[in-house]
Amino acid sequence: MKRTPIVVTATVAGLAGVLAFHTSPPEVNLTPSPGTTGQQADQSSPTAGRPAASPSRGPTSTSRPSPTPTSSSSRAASGNDGTRTIDGPAVNYSYGVLSVSVTLSGNKIVKVGIASLNDDGSFRSEMIDQQAIPILEQEAVQAQSANIQGVSGASYTSAGFKTSLQAALRSAGFS
């Protein structure tokens, strides 16, 4: 009987603490990156379209993109067969900067890839990106929109990818 008020008080305090706890999704910022050139890159593999690897840091490292300023954060390139490729804006996703490239044929997404990626040579970030980005690309093509699920363990990369993808699709007039 002597412990009952203590147990009840602690339970109420714990419950109030749990109910007051709020989570928020990771914040990503659209930032123009000096390395976003809007040029098409062959994206037949998950690492294609990324900056060239620096031999001094090993085979999985990426080098910093060249500081070539661009006047627009998203550009479109049209092909002769009705396909067009749109590069989304560079998005700072807390562990680096990435930009998504979307290839559309009419109103259909036929290919999604990375236009640029710079994770400042962080080995852990590179490993996460190498696993998550191919999954995100596949999900975007299957969903035919930017309404995709994030990859477990890569929430910041997923949020940055989705933000750049949404902006690219919006600039293409794709809903």
Image (cartoon, helix red, strand yellow):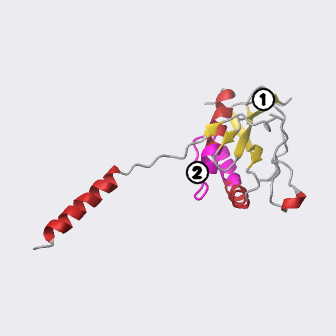
Residue 113, by quadrant, is: top right
Q: Sequence-wise, which precedes: disc 2 or disc 1?
A: 1
Q: Residues within 10 Å of mark 1 (few under 14, many from 20)?
A: some
Secondary element at tag 1: strand
Give the image location of residue 81, x and y in percent: 83, 31
Give the spatial CA distance, label 2 vs label 1.
26 Å
Q: What residue type is labelled 2?
A: Gly
Residue 150 disc label:
2
Q: Quadrant of the N terminus?
A: bottom left
Q: Which residue is drawn at 77% across and 29% down?
A: 75
Q: What residue type is labelled 1?
A: Ala
What's the magenta region?
133-161
Residue 155 within the magenta-colored segment of the rendering: yes
Give the image location of residue 94, x and y in percent: 63, 47
Residue projecting furthest to the right: 55
Give the image location of residue 150, x and y in percent: 58, 51
Q: In which quarter of the image is the C terminus?
A: top right
Residue 152 within the magenta-colored segment of the rendering: yes
Residue 107 seen in the figure: yes
From what the image shows, is residue 8 above or below residue 111? below
Per the image, the residue denoted by label 1 is: 76
Give the image location of residue 69, x and y in percent: 81, 31
From what the image shows, is residue 144 above or below residue 80? below
Residue 82 seen in the figure: no
